[in-house]
Image (cartoon, helix red, strand yellow):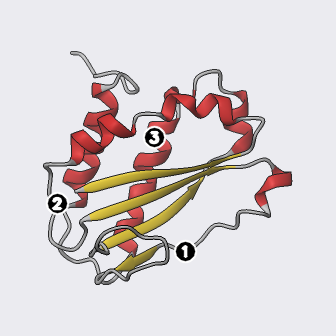
């Protein structure tokens, strides 16, 4: 499974999102996992824009491609079974929060429910995927493990 974040932020808040430079660990964590045959790659566009910048980046509808298409500028073979979607974060909430690691995991975990809205996706263990996503955030210390 491949999971990638594409990040789009207003300049005045971009510094807070530097902590999201976790792609290497993220790719490593999910590389040997499978959740079914219908999704092999997920691109999550993360948008956090001020009201002024927001109009330049309209939220796109979730898109699923069973058979990948060669796109201009692509290197290598097209990917199959790709889900591409975006989440728009609450700019004010993130601007006021000193450390986004305390709120970002919940927003991302909630966004994963988009998988269940795509009719073509039938063979995908969303519960296991969400559980692994949460485990990743615990592993890097963004979610505290519950202790009894």
Which residue occupies 80% across, 63% down?
A: 55
Please tell me whether mark 3 sits on a helix, a strand or a loop: helix
Horizontal relation, residue 94 to residue 139: left or right? right
Quadrant containing the N terminus in the rendered view? bottom left
| Cα–Cα span, label 2 and label 3 | 21 Å
Horizontal relation, residue 100 to residue 71: left or right? right
| Number of residues whose C-alpha sits closer than 10 Å to that of mark 3, classed few (under 14), some (14–19) or many (20 or more) | few
Residue 93, numbered label: none
Nearer to us: label 1 or label 3: 1
Which residue occupies 28% across, 73% down?
A: 77
Which residue occupies 33% across, 83% down?
A: 119
Q: Earlier in the sequence, mark 2 or mark 1?
A: 2
Please tell me whether mark 1 sits on a helix, a strand or a loop: loop
For label 3, the residue is 106
Nearer to us: label 2 or label 3: 2
Residue 35, numbered label: 2
């Amino acid at each position: 499974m491949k999971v990638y974040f594409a990040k789009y932020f207003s300049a005045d808040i971009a510094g807070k999102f530097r902590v999201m430079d976790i792609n290497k660990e993220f790719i490593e964590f999910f590389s040997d996992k499978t959740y079914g045959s219908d999704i092999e790659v997920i691109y999550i566009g993360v948008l956090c824009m001020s009201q002024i910048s927001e109009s330049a980046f309209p939220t796109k509808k979730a898109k699923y491609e069973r058979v990948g298409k060669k796109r201009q500028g692509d290197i290598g073979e097209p990917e199959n079974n790709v889900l591409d979607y975006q989440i728009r974060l609450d700019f004010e909430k993130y601007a006021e929060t000193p450390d986004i690691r305390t709120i970002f995991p919940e927003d991302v975990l909630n966004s994963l429910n988009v998988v269940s809205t795509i009719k073509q996706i039938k063979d995908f263990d969303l519960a296991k995927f969400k559980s692994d996503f949460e485990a990743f955030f615990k592993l890097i210390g963004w979610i505290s493990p519950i202790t009894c």
